[in-house]
Image (tube, grey):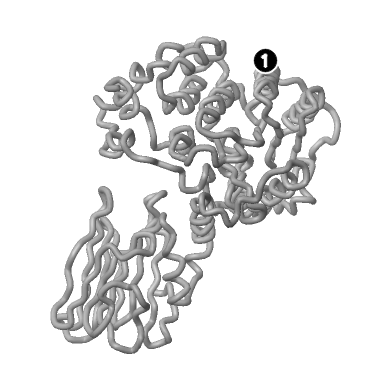
Amino acid sequence: MAFHYANVVLYEKQHFGTAKNIASEEPNQIDVFVNGPSHVFYGVNPYELWEQSGIAAYNLTTHQQPLWSSKLLLDYALEHQQPKLIVLDVLMATNFARPVLGTEQGTNMTHLVMDPIPLSLNKIRNVLKTDMITEKGEMIFPVILNHSRLQQGLTDYRDFQFAFTKQPHPMKGYNFTENVLEYTEPEVPESGTHELPEPMEDVLRDFIEYCQEKDLPLLLIKTPMVTNTEMYEQLNYIGEIAASYGVSYVDMNHLYDELGMDFAGDFADSGHLNVNGARKVSRYLADYIDAHYDLPDRRGDAAYESWDTGTLHSHNLTELRTETDWAAYLERLQDPNLLSVIVAGGVDDSGMCPEGLGHCSGTGAYYAVLDGGKTVSSGADGKNPIETSYLFEDLRFEVYASDKPADGTSQMARIEIGETGYVVYDSDFLVVTYDKDTRTVLDTVRFDTADGLRGSRKF
């Protein structure tokens, strides 16, 4: 037990990916696993599949995920879930695998998959029989590699808490980005093939055969990317391999028109989609799964509440910063991944306060902290300024609200997060909304009491 705890404390958790999160999902709820590297992490949003078709999907992703480790991660996930479909992005069977073949980089990328998997006979067996894993000792006992993180001061309190808390991934393995890089639509060869780098054809075949042995339906895909002819021809070659096993294969690089891909607006870089591209790919994938597989629609099932709340968060990532209606904004703050601090220099009795917003009545300075829409701290004072703070994990929110500032000119409200400050004057509500997942401020807005509590982001 102590050895397991040491492993959990010391392995790197701050990278993206869901190997470290999958055990925190409720067992036997996930119907679709989407395996693969960061092209999945940025390219498939499970909440789009949920919202469109009620598909309970989850991305089993890590950075540059070596294909041999995709199988081992899936094998671990099957200890917790009974999926009805496996989707694999085939990027790491192509030339993209070359940097991880027999290299230190490949070992490091395999660690991202294997370190979160608890020590067990199955883990030992899988590592020992996987020829592509050369550093077998440290892969079974990652503390051999990771003990230096403690010596170098690279751990913090979250590392020590991780073993005792559930840490589900708030986006079910999707990463949101609005970055845009413009490209010219590539010419993708409809025919012509190119062999895969050694030994990736064997590794791909091994993954396919593993799924067939487990009686798991498998769908191979490749999300849109901008690359060279050889790579596109390798993707064509994978289509031939899939056909030889009777496995479905969807190379979306042949479906730009059907997807409605916009090469000026849908890519964060040549291989990673932004939120616009991911929306198109995810909706197409949902339609394809609907048409070819008999999966249940889980919408309306109370056991799947995390998909509903996650969908709200997915919408908030793009829509919260444009919301200007006070009541609608507060409704959006029901998102359990958001922490909001509300401050006002002066609150009157004119109906500014919605029901349930703690202490918001009467006149004077006011503040509230909402966690997932629930008031966790609040206060009001009709005579004196309010000066207080709220600690979330290791981040302190400093709050100041005054009905009568020293210079007598106007009311004032201020929120400080670290070295960043936000301030409004008069009796407006100032709201700062913090994303607990990304640990960044998602939105800052003032609601003007002189304009029907209309939101503005002009300060």
Residue 105 lies, with reference to residue 171, above or below; the image says: above
Res. 43 image quadrant: top right
Task: Residue type at mark 1: give it.
Answer: Glu
x then y, percent, for residue 452? 42, 86
Residue 87 shown left or right of residue 28 in the figure: right
x then y, percent, for residue 333? 42, 65
Residue 123 lies, with reference to residue 44, above or below; the image says: above
Residue, x 47% and y 41% (percent of image)? Answer: 26
On the image, numbered disc 1 is attached to which residue?
Answer: 198
Q: Secondary structure at mark 1?
A: loop
x then y, percent, for residue 137? 41, 11
Res. 350 image quadrant: bottom left
Res. 414 image quadrant: bottom left
Residue, x 63% and y 41% (percent of image)? Answer: 270
Mark 1 Cα shell of 10 Å, populated few (<14), some (14-19), many (≥20): some
x then y, percent, for residue 192? 84, 28
| View extreme (right): residue | 191
Residue 344 shown left or right of residue 325 in the figure: left
